Each structure stands twice: as C-alpha cells, then as structure tokens.
Image: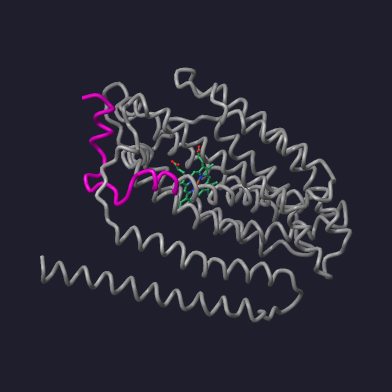
Amino acid sequence: MDVGTVINTMRDPAGVPATPVVFQILAVATWVFHIAFVMLTMGTGVLAVYAFFRRATGPFWEQLSLAMTKVAKVSVSLLIVLGVSPLLFTQVIYDPQWYTSNVLSAAWVIGFIFTLIVGYCLWFVFYEANHDGAKQYVGFYAVMSLAIFALDGLIMHVLAYQAILPAEWMSWYAPGGVVDTSGTKLHAIEWARYLFIMSLSAPAVGLFLLAYSEYLTVRRDKTREYLEFARDLGRKIAARGAIISALLAVWWQFDLPASTGLRSQPLGWLIPAGLVILAWLASQRHPRLHGYTMLSLGLVMVALLAIWREVIRVAYLKPFGYNADTYTVHADWPSTILFFSTILGVGSLVGGYYLTLLYRAGRVEGVYTAEPRVDRLGSAAVAVLVVWIGVFFVYGVAIWLRNAFLA
Ligand code: HEM
C-alpha cells in the first residue's frame, strides 16, 4: 500500500460536519492570533531581559523592563489559549498527518506540556523578583524561561513539519526495519522556517512599542520623555528586525524543495518584500504612520504568513493525493449554526466587552469606572452567555431524549 492511500484511509470515517474549506479557513485565521501572541511573548520577553540588564545605563530601562515583563506574562496565557483553536481545526482536516507526527515524537509532545509549565513558572519568578534594586541573577530566570519557550516553539515546528513529510514516516517509525516506539526523536527540523517565524518577534515588539507609546499618551503618569524613548526604540527594533526577518524569509524560500514549485510562487516572495516595506515605514517619522497603523500592517504580514504556510502544506501533500477538500462531509447543520452563532454572539459581545474594557481601563490612572455604554455592553455580554448556556443544554437534552426514546 502506498503512503497516499494510507493517509487517505487514516481519515476519520465520521467525516466533517461542514464543507472542509470552512475548517481550512478557520485553521489559518485562528493561527494568526496564536502566532501573533507567540511573537509578542518572545519579543517583549527578550526586551524585558535586555532592559533589565541595562537598568544602570539610563533612566527608562527599568520602567520599560517592568512594563514588558507584564506584557509577556499576559501574552503567554493568550498564546496558549489561542493555540487551542488552530489545533482543533488542524486535527479535523489534517488528522492523519497531525496524529502521526505527534506519535512519532510523543515524548516531546508530552514534554512540551511540562516544559511550558516550568517556563511559565520561571517567568512568574522573574516577574515577582523584577523590582527596584533586584539582584542581577534574577534576570537568568527570565533567560531560562525564554529558552524553554523557544524549545516549545521548536517542538511545535517539528510537529507541523513532520506532518507534511509522509514519505519519511516509515523510515522514522522503523529505521533500518527495526521499530522505534520511543518517540524520543525530533525527526525533521527546517531551520529556515523556524528561525524566520521566531525572528518575527523582533519587528513584532518594535511595532508593539509604537502602539504602546501611542496608547499611553493620554496617561499623565507616563512622561513624554519615556514614551518618546519607547517610540524611538520601537522604530529601531521594528526596522532592523524586519530586515533580518526578510533575509530569513528569503532563505526559507530557497530552502523549499524545487519539485513543489513553491519557490516561484509570488505569495512567498510577498513576505520578504512586505517586510522590507515595513522596515522602511517603521523608520519614517510621518505623523500619519502612528502606532496603530503600523501594528495593523504587522498583522497583515502575519496573515500572509498563515496563508503561505497553508499553501505550503497543500503543495507538500498534493503528490500523495491528499486534499483537505475531499474530506467526507456529513452535514450537521444544527451544530454548524450553533458554532457560528457562538462566534458571532458570544465572540462579539463577550470578546468585545473584554477588549473595550481593557482598552478603556488602561487609559486611565487609578480605578476605572465604566461609562454607561461599556456598562450596557457588559450586561449584554452576561445576557448572551446565559442564552448560550441555555441553548447548549436544551440542544443536548433534546438530542439525548430523541436518541433515548425516538430512535
Ligand atoms: C511557548 C509556547 C509556544 C510557542 C513558542 C509556539 C510556537 C509556534 C510556532 C513557531 C509555530 C509554527 C511552526 C511552523 O509552522 O513551523 C506554531 C504552530 C502551532 N502552534 Fe504553537 N507555540 C507554543 C505553544 C502552543 C500551544 C500551547 C498550543 C496549543 C494549545 C499551540 C498550537 C499550535 C498549533 C495548532 C500550531 C499549528 C500547527 C499546524 O498548523 O500544523 N502552540 N507554534
């Protein structure tokens, strides 16, 4: 039996509840948010440590280090939560690839959870200890934490990369004909791809600093000099970081196998080109190019990367006759409607409420009292949650009753 037949046979016979392209779009779109927070974590994390070790050299480094430590702390939790959705969608349409890849490196997959816990704890130790007059050694907790996060990113990369190399699976599973069930090996790493994605943390933190200084201009407890310092630093990091990332993107382009035809696809080249433009824009001081515009452009770049990863996956799996579009569909309209109405209703009202609240609260000093509009949004968010929980249970009970008494 050839590998193509195997991976097509390994698909879940239950099929998918809606047309597969829906899951493909959702996998790509939700990954954007996951990786954006990976970049923010790594970028703000490295900057927090750098600023920590530079505290003695200038008036603003300590303030910056404390601020970036807090951003990274929150960002890790968001990258974890936001990693779940692309994980689910990938598992739905690329289950043969994802599970095989996970089993082939199972020890690393299990280790991933524990290392993530240790890495996050270390960041909290740094966060607690990073205050006025903190000892230098405290910074090494943060260095260890970031090294562990980088390792976790490498594990994620290996899982994603091994998944698109089915021709190699047998030689990894049974090298020389001897079965190896240890799962202790990381079988394939594409350094160009991994380093490029991780390097985007530099332009990301640069763009974040531009938006950060813009956002805090209304706060009287943040001096104009500090915000100017953060903006200038952001410009420098974004411009230089984007150039380094652009070079790594070119390396990745040439690293793609010639047989896939991916090297000559314009979309792949749009990424380094876009990064060069971003670097140029970041170095400008044009008043219209304020922090939020630049951050939005950065998000567009991340979206391009997400689409490009999917194009690569499709191209790698094509020779094996694997196409997500041909996944068996067993339409389940009620659950599809429930899913999308949850995203629309709960997502927009509850998510919108939290985002509005955080945005407004961060712009005032001391205690924030919600304005009537934000207050109403809060009530609507609670109401939609109550409706959602009600619908969820009524739907479940209705199905249970139907199966128990009518089937
Ligand atoms: C510090 C922790 C993490 C880091 C640094 C990290 C980093 C990365 C990177 C660099 C990639 C892209 C790999 C590539 O395309 O080559 C990736 C993909 C991914 N990550 Fe994470 N990640 C982390 C934690 C998580 C967690 C906790 C989850 C799930 C809850 C998750 C879910 C995913 C998924 C689903 C993908 C895409 C896989 C695919 O498309 O095949 N990640 N991550």
Q: Nearer the viewer, residue 314 or 130?
A: 314
Which colour style is shown? Answer: one colour
Q: Is residue 90 left or right of residue 274?
A: left
Whole-percent x, y for residue 286 in the image: 84, 46
Snapshot quadrant of residue 241: top right
| Up-down relation of residue 353 to residue 369 (above or below) | above
Residue shown at 63% from the left, 78% from the top: 373
Residue shown at 26% from the left, 23% from the top: 177
Q: Is residue 8 left or right of residue 384?
A: left
Task: State the count of labels.
Answer: 0
Residue 331 is one of the magenta-drawn residues: no
| Up-down relation of residue 90 to residue 70 (above or below) | above
Residue shown at 87% from the left, 57% from the top: 59
Q: Nearer the viewer, residue 46 or 15?
A: 15
Quarter of the image containing the N terminus? top left
Residue shown at 26% from the left, 69% from the top: 396
Q: Is residue 407 left or right of residue 399?
A: left
Q: Nearer the viewer, residue 367 or 20?
A: 20
Whole-percent x, y for residue 261 in the image: 48, 21
Snapshot quadrant of residue 374: bottom right
Magenta segment boundaries in residue numbering:
1-26
Residue 12 is one of the magenta-drawn residues: yes
Whole-percent x, y for residue 251 in the image: 61, 25
Quarter of the image containing the C terminus? bottom left
Q: Nearer the viewer, residue 285 or 184?
A: 285
